[in-house]
Image (cartoon, rainbow, N blue to C red):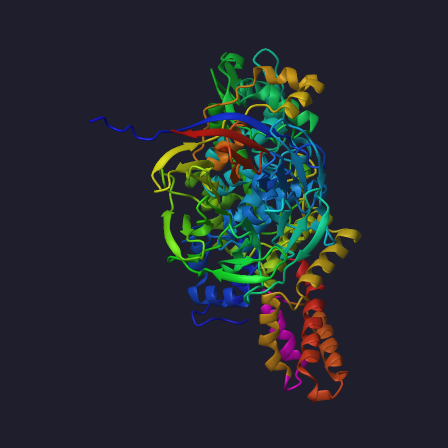
Amino acid sequence: MVTSATGTDTGLIAHLLRRAGFGGTRAEIEHFAELGYEATVEHLLDPPSVESMPQDIIRRYHVDQSDLRIQPAAGSNWMYRMVTTNAPLLEKIALFWHRVFATGQTKLIQGKVIVTQIEMFRKLGLGSYRDLLLGLSRDPAMLMWLDNNDNHGNAINENYGREILELFSMGVGNYTEKDIYECSRAFTGWTIANMPYNVQKMRNNTARPYGYIAWQFKFDESDHDFGEKTFLGQTGNFNGDEIVDIIAKQPATARFIARHLYHYFVADELPVPQWPHLPPRDPDAIEQMAEAYFRSGYNIGEMLRTTFNSDFFKAQAVHNARIKSPVEVVVGSLRLSGGYDWPTMDVYDATASCGYMGQGLLNPPSVEGWHGAEEWVNTGAMMQRVNYASKVLGDLSRPGVRAIVDAVMPLTDDGDAGTMVDECLAHLGHLELDTETREAVVNFAREQMAELPGGGKAKRAEVEQVVIAVLQLSVATREFQLA
Amino acid sequence: MATQAKPTYKISYATTVGFTADFGGRGFHLPVDMAVRDDGHIFVLSRSSPVATPGMRIVETDLKHTFYGEFGSFGTGEGQFTRPSALAIGPNNHLFVADDSLNRITEFDAQNNYLRHWGTAGDKPGQISGPSGLAFNRDGDLLVVDHLNHRVQTFTMRGKYIAQFGAPGHRRSQFNLPWGIDVGPDGQVYVADWRNDRIQRFAPDGEFIDSHGGHGSADGKFNRPSDVAVGPDGFIYVADWMNQRVQVFDTNWKFQTKLRGQATLSPWATEYLDANQDEFRARKSFQPVIEVDATDPHEISARIESYFWDPVAVQVDKKGRLYVLETNRHRFQVYQSAST
């Protein structure tokens, strides 16, 4: 275990940065180790500034990232945020809610409305779950995604009323079919402005004549069922707001959201459809998080504060106990490699690569989102993950890779391959390899150095290529696929 | 003694030309610049998307909505571009196109045939990095906004370097990623100093005259002005890009008015709706202007179809007609100005 001057375990800081962000560079890990663990948690939860590549710069060079119509443009706009932000937890929590409240461009066609939804997640995602759920219920992308525009006072459509209970709050087994119906009645009239024309454009998949019109929430009183409803044992003339209030105070909601957070931030859980039938991996952790939920007035940030400062989060057993999502692989690689100080066409490749690995941004496979865990890995996806990380972190033209190689080069002089490999691993977000894996990488480095022409007098460029090869082999390991 | 009436300025909406055509054909896709020839022919440059490149081209049209055709395409070959950024028509009616990725200027003749291209990447005199604005001066030489070098360079039409002015910074004669450019009827040069939120004015020889603007949304302030045009009567039009409006000033920078956009359906758009009756019917209940629950002008424009959405370029023809090109709505709106 390596500790900083403040006694902070750098491995623990690296663990925190992998979970509350996309991993850290060596400089970031050392900086936060000096700051201390608890202070780092506070810094992540309440960043002193929030900066990323400015939108005016992005829009000028990538004009398709202004109207955000097509998925490559809209997804890439988010990719810029994730790669360049100095407040990574805001992006990580937005990505979390994108998985839970999955909304997809395949149906909605225009990416902009989902980007606006993501912005709402960024803004409300660490605050009150009640406010977030209300924001979601008024979100035009969600309303159209789950057909609430077809939920009329005299003709109920239960799609949103069902999913808000099944997937967005309590989970199966905690409500009845009657509750779904009553919930749906409460959301009648929750639609978007200019609904008929906007729906027709969406159905026809047409940007003609003048592009898409971004949607806006509208409460249509004339289409709302103002009658009495009985929902989860309470009776009243509920509108959607009151339904959200009732949902937010349910113990089942607290446990369901806690299990989602655990799955995403702590350790891989079972796929959501199995949750009604199988207990959580760590029931005590779920109870602690649920307790924080009620103690804080449904505050998600407080649940995460409790989590990050808990023993169950710091435990060695949950280090590298999650399989990185494709976005984590891509963004983590790019944050290490650098090269995003200015708009680059590389961003489209990064966004597409997430899709090739099975996580197309703004395009989840269904309303269930991505299950994650072992479902991230199959033969094709694994190849994509390894090849992408190896390509990016083997590219010496990227400033981050250049800096890593420059830092490692002095350690190649004495011929100690182990020292060189450890330095590489330290620069790869404090990558911890199994003993056997590390030994294989060290042997590889030793053999490569020995094969250099001129032995110890090899040219610098040739030695640099060995360092690059070590970096590429390191990110091709099983351990790099874990967070 | 009779008092002399103050000159008055008026401007009124005339028409909209355009249509979304992201795979080529009649219309535009994410256009970034336009040029108006003296015979009334209008050229619109679509930058399009790097992942939907069939939309990248130049379309020739006019105010009668005639579609004359298209030329140019994505690529690095002759007459192609990868990230086209600006247009200008030379005194010989040839069309010049800038590409801010390939760092070159391409020349087409008056029949839209490719003639040549020139340009060398770099930051030395005569080299260019990200050409983003083009205009011809009274001598028939081409002014190139060399935006990543934060300067303006003058070349002959064949690309021979003549002169330059400007440097990085925020003081007078300095630029921060400048974008559009125009030459007034008296030969003065106007540059949209994009990230300094101002317009700078120079004498024909590049000597600084004055500047106007500052960051903000009040009248006379700008938020990333992308282009400037000067009418035959000296009135100045600024594409106030991130404020999603066009501001008009007299030659002394006195604010005259601002435009937010009031597009109507072009004949191309009308024909489309006629041919797609399901959309035509659905549009009958369409409220073009709604009360928007957002304050960001970009977001407001996204929700109101008739407003400017990324008004990127402005042009004024010899009859005083103002053309406002909108990237995200794939069209340009035309206004008739008059000063008495």
* Horizontal side of residue B268 vs B219, given as left or right: right
| Any part of residue B67 in sight | yes
Per the rendered image, the range of residues in magenta is A413-432
As drawn, the residue found furthest toward the left would be: B1
In the displayed structure, B110 sits above or below B170; it is above
Q: Nearer the viewer, residue B80 or B118?
A: B118
The structure residue drawn at horizontal position 38% and vertical position 29%, both measured from the top left corner, is B340
Q: Quadrant of the C terminus of chain A?
A: bottom right
Q: Nearer the viewer, residue B325 or B196?
A: B325
Image coordinates for residue B35, horizontal then vertical, percent: 58, 41
In the displayed structure, A241 sits above or below A368; it is above
The structure residue drawn at horizontal position 56% and vertical position 18%, both measured from the top left corner, is B286
Count up the numbered dots.
0
Q: Nearer the viewer, residue A41 or B324?
A: B324
Image coordinates for residue A454, horizontal then vertical, percent: 74, 88
* Horizontal side of residue A230 vs B202, given as left or right: right
Q: Quadrant of the N terminus of chain A?
A: bottom right
